[in-house]
Every structure is written in C-alpha cells, then in structure tokens.
Image (tube, rainbow, N blue to C red):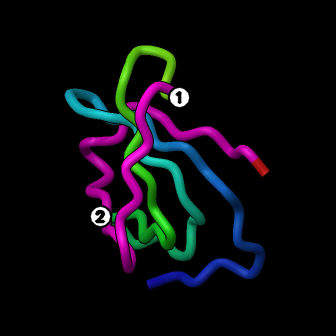
Amino acid sequence: MRLLKQKRKCRFHLQDGPTIEGILEARTRHTYVVWAPKVLTGESGAEAVVPVTGHVEIPRENVLFYQVIG
C-alpha cells in the first residue's frame, strides 16, 4: 500500500453507481483507500449526501475517473 504524503479531497465517479467524495489516503494496485467518505446521489451530485463512517476501499476497475477537489 502506498500512503500519500499529501492527502487530497477527491471525488470518485463510478462506472455504474453513485459518486463518492472523500480524502484519498492511499493507493494500491487494485484499490483507492478513501477516508471520511460521502456518497453523492442525484444528477448534480448535491441533491442528497449520505455520510459513511470509517473508510472505504474502491476497486480501481469500478472508477471511471476521479477529480481532485482540494
């Protein structure tokens, strides 16, 4: 697992699912590790926010692209 020196807030756009926003903590060969995730639902992404506790691991093959927000 490669821990990142600088943590960045990112938004992950999944292929067949919702958008996940959180702090990108680490990258592995197969996953992105995201802390303080929020699931954004709706077309604009701001209509409904569902917070998730802990962290999530997103498989790289499910990510269409990700944005660095801050």
Magenta residues, as a range?
A: 46-69
In the image: residue 23, left or right of residue 33: right
In the image: residue 62, left or right of residue 51: left
Alpha-carbon span between mark 1 and mark 2: 28 Å
Which residue is nearer to you in this view: 2 or 13?
Answer: 13
Crowd tier of the residue under label 2, counting other residues whose Cα lies within 10 Å: few below 14, some 14–19, many 20 or above = few
Residue assigned mark 1? 46
Query: Given contact means CB atoms under 8 Å apart, are the residues at marks 1 and 2 in contact?
Result: no
Mark found first going from the N terminus, 1 or 2 = 2
- Residue 68 lies in quadrant: top right
Residue assigned mark 2? 30
Which amino acid, by three-letter code, is at mark 2?
His
Whether residue 4 is situated above or below residue 65 in the rendered picture:
below
Whether residue 36 is situated above or below residue 60 in the rendered picture:
below
Asked whether residue 67 is drawn in magenta, I would say: yes
Which amino acid, by three-letter code, is at mark 1?
Ala
**Mark sitting on residue 37:** none
Element under disc 2 = loop
**Residue 41: percent from left, percent from top:** 36, 31
